[in-house]
Image: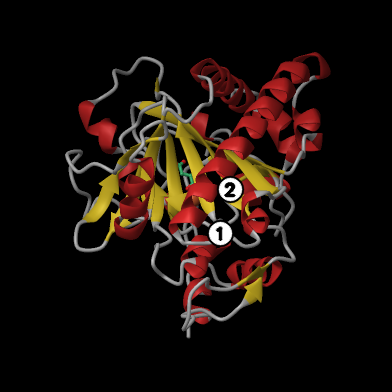
């Protein structure tokens, strides 16, 4: 295989996507295209400036576990700058990026999704994860004169995302009738920012960008950048339904329309527990395309590690545990963590 990486890099990334002309067996998934609905089903849209926003958020969290958020208050010019920085990061040579390779079992730095060990096949993806203000890894990756702009842009988006996450979490708590100790859930420094690249793929019908999973967060904010055509290719219409998809019971995999001005907001496991199952942590995945490279970033809003998580209403459908304990359960078995604490 041309362009193969070596050693630890090979274990983590397996291949250099840009020089791979055929889908290797290690990356071949089955049933990627089954049960996908067309692009006509749409995910609820919430306008944060609309007086009815709260009601739409309630319905969306109950029925979908996901919504799109517009008029969120983050300047669109900043979103464009972040998109450019992310593209710049991933366009660095593989030898440069693998200087910040994630150690086995680690959560931050460069590499395949942390959920990879739970799946038999490798994902068509490269990612860079920053927990807290972890820029040390970026320092290793960027040549020094190039780092300043990345750092400034990422610090700014992190600050803005934190404010937006606090505002949305506050609205959700109000919906759940929670007024006591609201701060624990709203104000937290236990967040993660994850950048993703899904390179164009020679056989997208049998590849998986990000395998089906639920997020371990209260809420997650995902931004999808405008896709980039692969050199020499036209973007095909069918590729519009490739990318982020959510699983809706009785319907199938629903593509989430790409709009670079909005954030996609997912309900995560912690909110399912707190709401005592009223809001559902949404199962989602990302598929890939032959004609485009796709980029995204996700901001995970989580309570601090020592916070005790238990349902706000009785009788509880989940047993109480700390955020740290839940992380440990999820690290042992991502498919079964929620079910293992249900009562
Ligand atoms: O890239 C996407 O659209 C989804 C990414 C995601 O689900 C994640 O980072 O947890
Ligand atoms: Fe996710």
* Quarter holding residue 141: top right
* Quarter holding residue 282: bottom left
Q: Could you tell me which residue is drawn at 72 percent across and 43 percent down?
A: 101
Image mark for residue 216: 1
Q: Are marks 1 and 2 in contact (CB under 8 Å)?
A: yes
Q: Is residue 193 visible?
A: yes
**Depth check, front residue: 281 or 15:** 281
Say whether mark 2 is within 8 Å of ligand 1.
Answer: yes
Under circle 1, the secondary element is: loop
Q: Could you tell me which residue is drawn at 42 percent across and 27 percent down?
A: 71
Q: Is residue 26 visible?
A: no
Image mark for residue 300: 2
Q: Could you tell me which residue is drawn at 69 percent across and 52 percent down?
A: 107
x, y (%) of residue 182? 62, 57
Left/right of residue 169 with respect to residue 232 in the rendered view:
right
Under circle 2, the secondary element is: strand
């Amino acid at each position: 295989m041309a362009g193969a990486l070596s050693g630890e890099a090979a274990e983590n990334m397996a291949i250099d996507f840009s020089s791979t002309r055929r889908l290797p067996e290690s990356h071949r998934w089955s049933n990627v295209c089954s049960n996908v609905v067309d692009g006509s089903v749409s995910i609820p849209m919430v306008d944060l400036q609309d007086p009815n926003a709260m009601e739409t958020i309630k319905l969306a969290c109950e029925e979908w576990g996901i919504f799109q958020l517009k008029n969120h208050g983050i300047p669109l010019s900043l979103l464009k700058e972040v998109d450019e920085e992310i593209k710049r990061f991933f366009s660095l040579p593989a030898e440069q990026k693998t200087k910040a390779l994630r150690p086995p079992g680690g959560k931050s730095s460069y590499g395949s999704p942390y959920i990879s060990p739970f799946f038999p096949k490798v994902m068509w993806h490269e990612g860079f994860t920053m927990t807290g203000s972890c820029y040390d890894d970026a320092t290793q990756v960027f040549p020094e004169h190039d780092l300043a702009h990345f750092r400034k842009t990422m610090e700014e988006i992190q600050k803005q995302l934190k404010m937006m996450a606090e505002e949305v979490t506050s609205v959700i708590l109000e919906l759940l009738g929670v007024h006591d100790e609201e701060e624990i859930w709203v104000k937290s420094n236990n967040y993660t920012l994850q950048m993703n690249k899904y390179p164009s793929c020679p056989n997208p019908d049998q590849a998986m960008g990000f395998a089906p999973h639920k997020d371990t967060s209260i809420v997650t904010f995902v931004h999808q950048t405008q896709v980039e055509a692969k050199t020499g290719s036209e973007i095909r219409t069918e590729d519009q339904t490739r990318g982020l998809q959510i699983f809706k019971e009785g319907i199938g995999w629903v593509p989430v329309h790409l709009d670079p001005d909005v954030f996609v907001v997912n309900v995560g496991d912690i909110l399912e527990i707190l709401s005592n199952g009223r809001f559902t942590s949404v199962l989602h995945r990302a598929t890939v395309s032959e004609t485009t490279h796709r980029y995204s970033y996700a901001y995970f809003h989580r309570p601090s590690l020592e916070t005790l998580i238990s349902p706000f209403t009785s009788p509880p459908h989940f047993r109480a545990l700390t955020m740290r304990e839940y992380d440990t359960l999820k690290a042992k078995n991502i498919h079964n963590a929620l079910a293992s604490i249900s009562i």
